[in-house]
Amino acid sequence: MPRLALGIEYDGSAFAGWQFQSHARSVQGDLQLALAQVADHPIELTAAGRTDAGVHALEMVAHFDTTAERPLHAWMLGANANVAAEISVLWAHAVPDDFHARHHATARRYHYRVLNRRMRPALERQRVCWVRHELDAERMHEAGQALVGRHDFSAFRASECQSPSPVRELMELSVERDGPYIDLRVRANAFLHHMVRNIAGSLILVGRGERTAEWLSAVLRGRDRRDAGPTAPPDGLYFVGADYPAGFGLPSVKLRRPPTGAAS
């Protein structure tokens, strides 16, 4: 049975997350119904990651199997014609039968965007995390380097996280100021539930001067979630994309940052 991969952009504000839920609206559920209209049979999607309620994606990769023979552009146009405006299929690509969007991903990338100004946002109220107190991006970046590497991230996982192991390899972490924005970018082989938001919440405390870089290192070593900062809200979190071996030839829209509103 032919297998196809999709690149998907979505605004997570109206959804209970990526994963299908019988009692709530999900990105997976809505898109599966739209694709079924094109295929004339039920579709089951498997994605590179599972975002929580309110979390967005610039390029989520997912695959599905189908008996329908359609041109690649027909899958894109047909899905977008039948799905809500909050979701857009950016590309479709034929992949080998053994391709797996989750298992073959060698890394995932997230971007957490903070709007750091005195007044709350209106246009971006569900697109950024608003922090009114001045943040020191350099201080946040320096503190965050203690998290880079292969570690036990128990201090930054949600209590309901179902992963059998808390060990992850954080390959990159950077924090930069862009005008009124603070941009946290992370890349890892995989992430624990709420891991990025818990890291963001802890770094915000450092940026406000309420905690030190040494504190963050101690939290990591202590492996106790109660010692870390609060879970940052989902609004500022974006799944940027996943990395795959070049042999699969997956396309990419190269969109590596969230849209910017009128924040000045």
Image (tube, grey):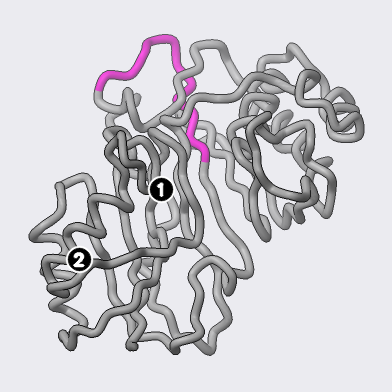
Amino acid type at image mark 1: Gln
Is residue 115 shown left or right of residue 225? left
Callout 2 touching callout 1 (CB < 8 Å): no
138 or 21: nearer the viewer: 21
Q: Residue at x 56, y 55 (%)?
A: 109
Is residue 233 shown left or right of residue 200? left
Instruction: Measuring from the top left, give residue 9's x and y in whole percent.
Output: 31, 55
Q: What residue is pinned by disc 1? A: 19
Amino acid type at image mark 2: Leu
Give residue 67's quadrant in the image: bottom left
Q: Secondary structure at mark 2?
A: helix
137 or 114: nearer the viewer: 114
Q: Is 249 placed above or below 88 here?
A: below
Report the span colored magenta.
Answer: 112-122
Quadrant including the C terminus: top left
Q: Residue at x 65, y 43 (%)?
A: 162
